[in-house]
Every structure is written in structure tokens, then in C-alpha cells.
Image (spheres, grey):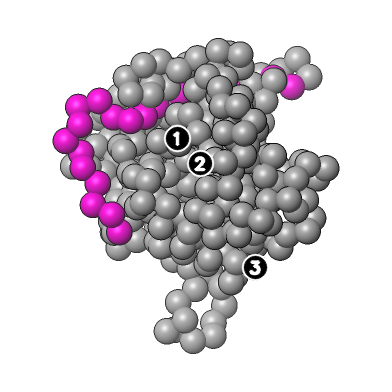
Amino acid sequence: MNVVSHKQTVPLLEVEGLSVDYGLKGASWRAIENISFELQPGEAVALVGESGSGKTTTAMAVAGLLSPNAVVSGGEVRYRGKRLPIDDDAAMRPHRWKETSVVFQGAMNALNPVHRIIMQIAEPCMLHGMSRAEGMVRARELLELVGIPPDRGSAYPHQLSGGMRQRVMIAMALACRPSIVIGDEPTTALDVINQAQVLNLLVELRAKLNLALLLITHDLSVVAETCDRVLIMYAGRLVEDGTVAKIFTQPKHPYTRLLIQSIPDPAEGVRELRAIPGDPPTLSTRPSGCAFHPRCPSAMAICRAEIPLLSKDGKSRVACHLHGDRYEAEKAPVHV
Ligand code: SF4
């Protein structure tokens, strides 16, 4: 695990009070609510949560890649202290690829099937001012960097294995030397062997290029191998933030505890898998108060009525009424 310097006064990335709504059939639904976190140079942070928790919306908002029916309804994102125009597609173009880039899941869908991979890697370089010849030279360097012989650059995506296609996606993401790479479940579509190889590649590249990683995943084993810090999301809110060591050994939020308990332990032998009872809420069925209360084994009366504050405990944060009395509140409660 890398040692990350926190001496800088201005973080590489600051997300402050970010809220995003989706418009659908004349109605508006809040997808994420008041999300705040920072990313330091070279740091790897995982965004973890079940489907619908808001992790992809958070990451796509940071990259300025929200869908057309999404509206940034609050907060802002800063890169090296400067506000990013995340809700303006044209204004975000100079920032994409150069400052923040994304490795999408499912490379077969993300790559263009009728273009050779070398051209697809060279394209972002050309969008950011390189000539075609310079772009092709850079694309060959990047293929080598991700472990693909440069002469395979003339292949089309369907001529490569799943693992190689995902390496191409990583090469594309690195084309303009960004400081932050967002991985949107980058290993989900891969078999176990390719998954391990792609993860090792990300870890290697992070160390070599001092990349900051924001990794979206629901796979806690990926988090343990790759990240320094974990942000746990539930129903559009950040519910816990801590180092990997803290989250795995002393989780505070009941949801985090149940997530950790659901990881099968091979040392315990064959037994029934532990799942979290109930289903996560949809955008239109979010419960009042703490959205986790219908599934929480520790729920109290206050949990149904009041949204818990995100409170600080050293470098960790947790949003749960079980901990609210003990820690100084960081922000005023948000009522929806
Ligand atoms: Fe459970 Fe209440 Fe904490 Fe929510 S606030 S996680 S319902 S104890």
C-alpha cells in the first residue's frame, strides 16, 4: 500500500456538498445528497455501495459526464482548488482526459468496434492538441505501458481478449497524463485471472505515475487489494469514510458492518452466505430519516425521523445516530 502525503494544503480533488437530481417524466428524483470528500495526489479511494447507492452518479459528476436528464442541484467539485464546470459539457472538455479520465466497465461496449485500437488511444491525444503522428507515437508508448505489444495496435476490439480490451481502456485513460483516474467497476466483466491482472496493472501504474484513483466497486476484495481509503454510500448519501484498515477491522456504521460480515471467510469452511436482509431503496422509495432504518438491526425511533449527521472521529466519518452523541457534528442535517 502506498504512503500518501497529506502535507499539501490544497487537495487534488475536493467534492463539497454535491447533490444531483434526475428528471424523469416531469418529476425530479434526488440521486445523491450532500456528498463531500477529498482526494490527495497518489491516493486510491474506493466508492462502495449496492446498486442505486449513488456511487456511479458521484463519479460521473466528478468527471462532468452526467446524463442529459441529470442536474447538479447543489455543491461543487474543485480540481487543485479551482471549481470545475461539471454541469457544462463544452466547458468540461479541456479538463477531461487531461485532469480526470475514466476507465469504464465492459470494454466491448465502451470501445468503438469499427476503429483500430491504436486510433482509439491516439484520439484523446489529438483532441488535446497533438498531431496525428504524435498521437500514434504516444498510443504505441501507452500500449507498451499496459503490457500489449505495440504491433497489436492495428487490431480491432473484437480481435482482443477481454483482459486486453480492458488494458486498452486503461491506456486510453492515461493518454493525456491525467492526475486522477476514475475506475467504474473496471474488472466487473472479467474472469478471475484477468481481474487479478488488470488490478495488478492499476496498482503498478498508480505507483509509477503517482495517479490518484477513484474506484467504484461493490467488491470489497478489490478494495482491500487496491485502495487506501473507503467511502461507503447508501441511498445517495455518504454513510462512512475511513481507511481500509479501519473499515475492515472496526466498521462503525451498521451497514458497513453487515457488508464486511457478508464477505465469505474461507477459513470458516463451507457455510451459508450472509446477505443483508431486505433490498436497497429505489430513488422513489427512499425511507424517511436514516434510509437504512428498515434493514438496520440497531434501528431506534429517532432513526425513522431524523437523517443522521455525518460526524467526524479523527480522520474517519460516520453518519449514524448510534455515534452522533459522541462526535462533533460536521454539518447541519439535510432534510429532503
Ligand atoms: Fe441504524 Fe439508526 Fe444508525 Fe441508521 S441511524 S444505521 S437506522 S442505528
- Residue 178's label in the rendered image is 1
> x and y percent of residue 119 in the render?
69, 39
Residue at 36% from the left image edge and 33% from the top image edge = 37
Of labels 3 and 2, the one closer to you: 2
Q: Is residue 235 magenta?
A: no
Quarter of image, res 225: bottom left
Q: Looking at the picture, tell me which residue is in the foreground, 111 or 293.
A: 111
The residue type indicated by label 1 comes to: Pro
Q: Is residue 258 left or right of residue 70?
A: left
Q: Residue at x 53, y 31 (%)?
A: 97
Indicate the amino acid at tag 3.
Answer: Asp
Q: CA distance from mark 1 to mark 2?
A: 6 Å
Q: Kindly indicate the quadrant of the structure image that contains residue 88.
A: top right
Q: Position of residue 134 (x, y in %)?
A: 57, 33
Residue toward you, 145 or 232: 145
Q: Residue furthest front?
A: 133
Element type at mark 1: loop
Q: Is residue 207 visible?
A: yes
Which segment did they paint magenta?
Answer: 1-24
Q: CA distance from mark 3 to mark 2?
A: 23 Å
Q: Residue at x 34, y 49 (%)?
A: 229
Marks 1 & 2, CB-CB < 8 Å contact: yes
Give the mark nearest the N terminus, 1 or 3: 1
Tell me the residue that label 2 is attached to: 174
Give the residue pinned by disc 3. 191
Disc 2 element: helix
Disc 2 residue lies near ligand 1 with CB under 8 A: no
Residue in the picture at 77% in, 51% down: 156
